[in-house]
């Protein structure tokens, strides 16, 4: 990429900015549909909505035949609102977590949501409020891997899942609680690589044999990576599904019937669909370092500050689209905190990025912001949550209004003794 970009999809950046102001997340419908088609070899695609849980995005994936994962009562509520089916043993929603809280229990009961259990304690608890139900065990296979240590969900330092050595004990716990173990699930981390993801296959066969004939579903979890750096290759999905086909065949041979393969991607389905549009508000120099300061910070997109995550950046000049000279810059946001920098590496090391020369007022586009962008945004520094817009080839639709100032304080109050 040449780091100059005047369009998002078919739409001109300046016109979108005029219509919705900045910062705003723009999602492209077609990209989400394409990514769903990429993984169609799975028997069930279960979207990990934590990546982006706007109800319009949920509706879009639901219309493509995708099912959904929910990790909280709020996510169950969103999925139900978006129209995912529940009840009658045919729920499109699965609750995956390491604990139950009161809110979750009440919605699981209300909508008869099946559960993917991540701790032994949950088995006895589920047995009391949903006796007779089918359950999936989330196994921590003893290893994990992710794009950052912070998103590695396997191994003995991870709080996630049931420790693989405890499976037999959990099978008895489930039996005693009147539950049928019909699924096994393993999610070893996010943005992992093919080598580690394929290790999950071996572990799945080993543990599937322990569950035996009641097993109907295996879930490979999420974690499929996307190339955040445009010169990096895409994951070889054919090789990935070939391995899973073999795994299914090995399990079928052992338990004497077929099982279904579920995958649970979050970022793979939505990350690349979205551009975060910001505007450059100040350009300043500190000795040799030149800073572009934009009107979105880690309140809007926390991934660089939290993981040192890399996002491609490009510039859309406000007044001219002629090719610009490049220069090394640091891109920062508006927050009163020094880690509010989009160009940084893990550990907080600020780095330069070669970008076109720009002026105050030009637009700065942060790419691949669809997963864990809006979903992880906050009101830190009392910044308002950004707007979200869904683009089709020839239209654009507001799917979340920018917060108002009143929204910021609407649940707060000054007690009488202070008045
Ligand atoms: N399934 C389970 C049980 C998970 O915990 C996750 C992510 C996924 C599926 C989806 O993973 P994905 O396909 O999106 O990698 N905030 C971090 C990612 C943390 C994800 C937590 N769990 C980031 O911005 O990279």
Image: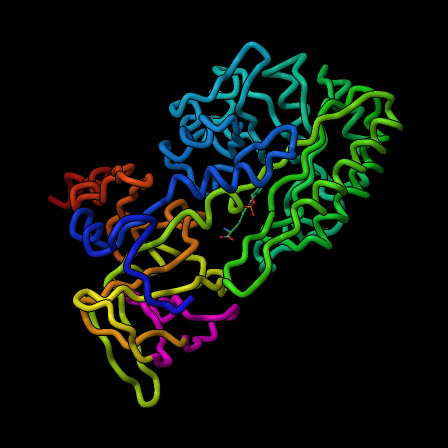
Q: Which residues are magenta?
A: 326-353
Q: Quadrant of residue 44?
A: top right
| The residue positioned farthest toward the left in the image shown | 419
Would residue 208 appear left or right of 103 to someone viewing this image? right
Q: Nearer the viewer, residue 365 or 306?
A: 365
Q: Is residue 96 above or below residue 289?
A: above
Would residue 29 appear left or right of 394 to someone viewing this image? right
Q: Quadrant of residue 212?
A: top right
Q: Nearer the viewer, residue 174 or 121?
A: 174
Q: Nearer the viewer, residue 92 or 416?
A: 92
- Residue 347 lies in magenta, yes or no? yes
> Is any part of residue 335 visible from this angle?
no
Q: Is residue 385 above or below residue 220?
A: below
Give coordinates of residue 417: x percent, y percent: 15, 42
Q: Nearer the viewer, residue 347 or 254?
A: 254
Look at 65% across and 15% down and name the residue there: 133
Give coordinates of residue 181: x percent, y percent: 73, 23
Look at 43% across and 63% down and name the residue there: 312
Would residue 269 appear left or right of 418 to someone viewing this image? right
Q: Is residue 102 above or below residue 391?
A: above
Quarter occupied by the N terminus: bottom left
Quarter occupied by the C terminus: top left
Q: Quadrant of residue 121?
A: top right
- Residue 336 lies in magenta, yes or no? yes
Look at 27% across and 49% down and name the residue there: 11
Look at 52% across and 23% down and name the residue there: 105
Give coordinates of residue 196: x percent, y percent: 72, 53
> Is any part of residue 36 visible from this angle?
yes
Give coordinates of residue 4: x percent, y percent: 33, 67
């Amino acid at each position: 990429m040449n780091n100059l970009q005047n369009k998002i999809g078919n739409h001109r950046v300046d016109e979108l900015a005029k219509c919705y102001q900045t910062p705003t997340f723009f999602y492209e419908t077609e990209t989400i549909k394409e990514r769903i088609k990429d993984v169609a070899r799975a028997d069930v695609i279960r979207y990990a909505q934590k990546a982006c849980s706007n109800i319009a995005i949920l509706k879009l994936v639901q219309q493509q035949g995708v099912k959904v994962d929910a990790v909280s009562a709020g996510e169950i509520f969103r999925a139900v609102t978006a129209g995912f089916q529940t009840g009658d043993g045919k729920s499109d929603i699965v609750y995956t977590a390491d604990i139950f809280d009161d809110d979750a229990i009440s919605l699981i009961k209300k909508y008869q949501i099946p559960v993917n259990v991540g701790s032994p304690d949950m088995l006895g608890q589920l047995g009391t409020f949903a006796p007779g139900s089918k359950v999936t065990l989330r196994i921590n296979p003893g290893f994990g891997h992710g794009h950052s240590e912070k998103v590695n969900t396997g191994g003995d330092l991870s709080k996630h899942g049931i420790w693989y050595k405890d499976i037999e004990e959990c099978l008895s716990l489930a039996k005693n609680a009147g539950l049928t173990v019909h699924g096994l699930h393993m999610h070893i981390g996010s943005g992992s690589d093919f080598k580690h993801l394929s290790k999950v296959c071996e572990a799945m066969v080993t543990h599937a044999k322990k569950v035996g004939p009641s097993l109907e579903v295996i879930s490979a979890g999420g974690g499929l990576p996307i190339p955040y750096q445009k010169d990096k290759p895409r994951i070889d999905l054919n090789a990935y599904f070939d391995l899973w086909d073999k795994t299914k065949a090995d399990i079928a041979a052992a338990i004497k019937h077929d099982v279904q393969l579920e995958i649970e991607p979050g970022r793979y389905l939505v990350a690349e669909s979205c551009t975060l549009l910001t505007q450059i508000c100040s350009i300043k120099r500190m000795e040799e370092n030149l800073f572009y300061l934009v009107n979105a910070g880690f309140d809007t997109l926390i991934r660089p500050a939290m993981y040192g995550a890399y996002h491609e950046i490009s510039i859309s000049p406000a007044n001219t689209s002629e090719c610009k000279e490049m220069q090394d810059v640091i891109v920062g946001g508006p927050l009163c905190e020094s880690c509010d920098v989009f160009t940084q590496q893990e550990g907080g090391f600020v780095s330069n990025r070669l970008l076109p020369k720009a002026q105050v007022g030009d637009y700065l586009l942060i790419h691949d912001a669809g997963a864990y962008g809006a979903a992880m945004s906050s009101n830190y520094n009392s910044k308002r949550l950004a707007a979200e817009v869904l683009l089709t080839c020839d239209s654009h639709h507001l799917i979340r209004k920018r917060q108002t100032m009143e929204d910021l304080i609407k649940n707060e109050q000054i007690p009488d003794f202070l008045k």
